[in-house]
Image: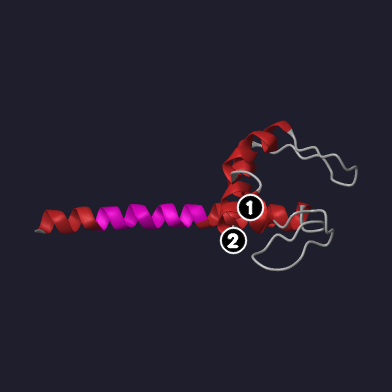
Amino acid sequence: MMRRLTLLGLFLAFASSVAIAQSGRVQRGFTFAQTNCSQCHAIGRVGESPIPEAPPFRTLHTRYPVEDLAEAFAEGITTGHPSMPQFQLDPAQINDLLAYLNSVQG
């Protein structure tokens, strides 16, 4: 019985640390999005994009799997319109932004 409680305690501690790490990634991703993307895109769970052609982040999953954006973020996102700056993110930034994007999908 004591061993099961110990294992349960270890599991809960691990799960808690994973959740805390994930929330840190989401927060860092939000900060990146707020700083670099919110001028054009709606980055939250509600609201319209300041530029109507810029898709709200919460709807990106309807266009393509969010995880598929990792490669584009690493190589540098470019679009057909000149007003969007080119971004090339490092692996930590990619993980943070993907965590945030996943957190707001509708």
Left or right for 81, reference 59:
right
Q: Can you name the residue that lies furthest to the bottom here?
A: 47
> Which residue is more in the foreground, 57 or 33?
57
Q: Is residue 13 magenta?
A: yes
Between residues 4 and 85, which one lies in front from this camera angle?
85
Three-letter amino acid code at disc 2?
Gly
Which picture quadrant has residue 100? bottom right
Q: Dot 2 corresponds to which residue?
A: 106
State the colouring used for the structure image. secondary structure
Residue 55: quadrant of the picture: bottom right
The outermost residue toward the left is 1
What span is colored magenta in the figure? Answer: 9-22
- Mark 1 against mark 2, which lies toward the viewer? 2
Callout 2: SS: loop
Tell me where residue 77 appears, x and y as whole percent: 75, 38
**Residue drawn where x is 71% and y is 31% of the image:** 75
Task: Judge the density around disc 1: few (<14), some (14-19), many (≥20) Cα neighbours within 10 Å.
Answer: many
Q: Is residue 14 left or right of residue 68?
A: left
10 and 63: which is toward the camera = 63
Residue that label 1 marks: 29
Farthest top residue in view: 75
Do callouts 1 and 2 mark residues in contact (Cβ within 8 Å)? no
Name which residue lies at 64% across and 40% down: 69
Residue at image point 74% right, 61% down: 42
